Image: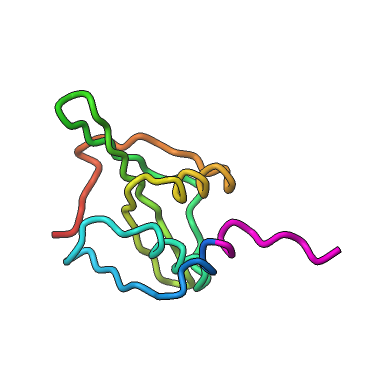
Amino acid sequence: MAGAAPSFIEMELRSNDTRRHWSPTSQPYAPADVLMQYLSWGWIISPVVGLEEHWHAGVRRVDVFHFELTKENQALVLPVQSNPVVRRLLSERQLKVVLLKRDDVSLSE
């Protein structure tokens, strides 16, 4: 029997052989692969994740998760739109999601 099955993050990183740069000054939301890159570089996710809901025409909701990441004495908040990778990460790590009020959310301009 070969070793243990690769983790979800390992599988996602293997399928992402190119690295992406993300800056809040050029893109308001980071792609999920940028979040995965930070995790592969040793950044730690806070156990509490903020959820920002956007409603379009009152019937279609788009969720943005705000992940607080830390490494040594550095910290950053990474806003990522909901997608299957993000939802699976939330589930597997059993992260607590808290709804953010619109006034609580500040995106860099």
Q: Is residue 45 magenta?
A: no
In the image, residue 40 sits, relative to residue 54, either above or below, namely below
- The image shows a total of numbered marks equal to 0
Query: Dividing the picture into quarters, in which one does residue 8 lie?
Result: bottom right
Residue that protrudes farthest toward the top in the picture? 58
Magenta part of the protein: which range?
A: 1-11
Residue 30 % position (x, y): 31, 59
The reply to whether the magenta stretch includes residue 7 is yes
Tell me: 68 left or right of 10: left
Q: Is 8 placed above or below 81 here?
A: below
Residue at horizontal 46%, vertical 50%? 85
User: Which residue of the protein is positioned furthest toward the right in this rendering?
Assistant: 1
Q: Position of residue 86 (x, y in %)?
A: 44, 49
**Figure quadrant of residue 73:** bottom left
On the image, the x and y values in percent for residue 39 come to 50, 65
- For the stretch drawn in magenta, what is the main secondary structure? loop
Residue drawn at x 26%, y 55% is 29
